[in-house]
Image (tube, grey):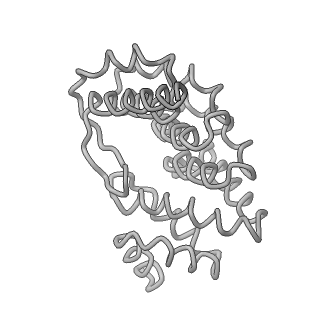
Amino acid sequence: MSPQKKEIIALLEKKAYDALIKLALADKKIISILISLSYDKNTQTSWRAMEAIGYATKEISSSNPETVRNITGRLLWMMRDESGGIGWSAPDILGEIVRNNPVLCSDIAPIIASFHDEKMLCAGVLRALGRIGAINTETVNYAVPIIRSYLKSADNTLRGHATWALGQMGNEDSASELKALNGDTNCIRFYEDGELKERSIGELASAAMEQLLKKINLQIR
């Protein structure tokens, strides 16, 4: 492992995102290293690498938007068959990029959503839509029916991520379906607040309901 890669891992372990952003602004190769660290979604470092890419591209786009567009193009290629399946984290990374660059990259959101029927990518697609929707719901509102269809999935990971995504988007039409999942004790590995955790789908459903209630209360006010 190169000294530079070791340095990046150490910064990710400390959640030193500001330092990572500075490195990325000075050296374009840093984004490539972060992408290479994102492949193993069973590690916390991988998820933090994805977040770091989002933060870094936000800063890069202010002076060099073409670089960010090139990164998204590379990630979209990785999601396709010819990439050899190494792009399993690509939807998650793209979600972070669109979330942090809503004007520059909003057109990428429908492309991300179009990969939901790819088994190995689906969880990442659901997460990406939730991450984008938490900041700019209008960008991904069209995908609500897609997300809701996974609330009845037999796959715990897909069901859990769909539950969480709808809460992030504040989709009130899903309230009854989310409420029905409150007693779902199946657990999934879930990344939030910089940590990789075990969360039950029922917990995610309860949190999603809280998000909906907050939105309703804000509307009433």
On screen, residue 179 above or below 207 = above
Q: Residue at x 50, y 78 (%)?
A: 19
On screen, residue 132 above or below 206 = below
Q: Residue at x 51, y 74 (%)?
A: 18
Q: Indicate left or right for 211 with 132 as reference.
A: left
- Quarter holding the N terminus is bottom left
Q: Position of residue 119 (x, y in %)?
A: 48, 32
Q: Position of residue 102 (x, y in %)?
A: 68, 49
Q: Indicate left or right for 179 with 183 as reference.
A: right
Q: Give 80 or 199, whichever is nearer the viewer.
A: 199
Q: Indicate left or right for 184 with 150 as reference.
A: left
Q: Residue furthest bottom?
A: 3
Q: Residue furthest front?
A: 221
Q: Residue at x 52, y 43 (%)?
A: 131
Q: Residue at x 52, y 25 (%)?
A: 220
User: Quarter of the image holding residue 21?
Assistant: bottom right
Q: Position of residue 2 (x, y in %)?
A: 45, 83
On screen, residue 2 above or below 217 = below
Q: Position of residue 132 (x, y in %)?
A: 58, 42
Total labels drawn: 0
On screen, residue 119 above or below 65 = above
